[in-house]
Amino acid sequence: MSFTTTIKKEITQIESTESEMIAELSGFIRNNSTISNGSLATTSEKLNVLERFQYFIKELYQVDSEIIVIDNVNFSKNDLYELKVEKDVNKILRNIGFYDENNEYLETAPTYIVGANEEIRAYLRGVFLCSGSINDPKTSRYHLELLIPTPAEAVFVQQLLNIFDLNAKIINREKGYMIYVKEAEKISDFLKIIKANNAVLYFEDVRIYRDQKNKTNRLNNCEQANMDKIIETATAQIEQIEIIEETNSIDLLDERTQVALKYRKKYPEASLKELAEIITIETGKSLSKSGLNHRLRKIKELAERLEKNKNS
């Protein structure tokens, strides 16, 4: 079962007030309906979604409706279900803000449909049940999208989402307008808005795990980069020491720098800090990291002079 299916299954079990039923039904019907010859039809691959709205229609308007299986033109393996209403259709559409009093289509739902916070949440729940999807945070990037058929409705839904500071964006698609949210925290907030509480817990658990894993990977990459740099630096220092030894020029270095040369050869993989600590312990003479770096720089300068004289 996909994450989106799990979310939809959860929110179809939410109990709603009458005004929330109207708002949720409005969000669903506006974005997924066909009206013809006095009948209303809406479809979904999720039987439990249509059963929810069938219950709403019966509860709100005392109208019976029928759910049937129809051909799925989307070439999906899943069955496609159709909810068909043939009685009091205009009355229902006026009540959910789809039609005005003259049975004329309204581009967006009237203010009274989404007049309160809970009604906005319900409307967005209806839109999500109709055409929403959220990627499973375990398997892919964070992504929420809602496919909306008309530009006016797309802007309207975007505005509702952004009441909750979700930073929702719109792009034009071939079959409509896609509203999307990509930030993990905002997607989690959306799940809270539509009251998918179990989905929120799952999403947050995975998000925290992924964030921690990414942090660990970054630290490991940083440590590896530091190790690579240490090895690269130490390799160059060993090469410089070899130049000095090949030309019998060690005596050109002062005594303390010769000690540094000796220990760099003995511990070629040690970092500057580690090497300074080793020299301090083994010689009994305190040596700081910067002091050791100064001595190794003398070795480098001598090697460069010797190499230059060799090539001149």
Image (cartoon, rainbow, N blue to C red):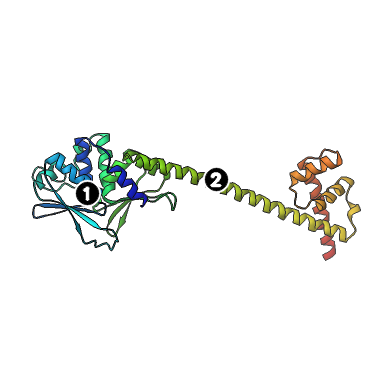
Residue at image point 29% right, 47% down: 128
Relative placement, left or right, of 125 versus 57 is right
Locate residue 307: give its quadrant.
bottom right
Please say whether residue 239 is visible from this viewpoint: yes
Per the image, label 2 sits on a secondary structure element best described as helix
What is the number of the mark on residue 312? none
Instruction: Calculate the distance from the C-alpha at mark 1 to the C-alpha at mark 2.
Output: 43 Å
Q: Where is residue 267 in the image (x, y as percent from the top left)?
A: 79, 50
Mark 1 crowdedness (10 Å alpha carbons): few <14, some 14-19, many ≥20: many
Amino acid type indicated by mark 1: Leu
What is the number of the mark on residue 50? 1
Residue at image point 42% right, 45% down: 184
Residue at image point 30% right, 55% down: 172
Residue extending farthest to the bottom is: 311
Disc 1, disc 2: CB below 8 Å? no
Locate residue 156: give its quadrant.
top left
What is the number of the mark on residue 215? 2
| Sequence-wise first label, 1 or 2 | 1
Q: Where is residue 37 in the image (x, y as percent from the top left)?
A: 8, 55
Q: Nearer the viewer, residue 53 or 263?
A: 53
Q: Where is residue 276 in the image (x, y as percent from the top left)?
A: 78, 43
Q: Nearer the viewer, residue 235 or 133?
A: 133
Mark 2 crowdedness (10 Å alpha carbons): few <14, some 14-19, many ≥20: few
Q: Nearer the viewer, residue 134 or 113?
A: 134
Amino acid type indicated by mark 2: Lys
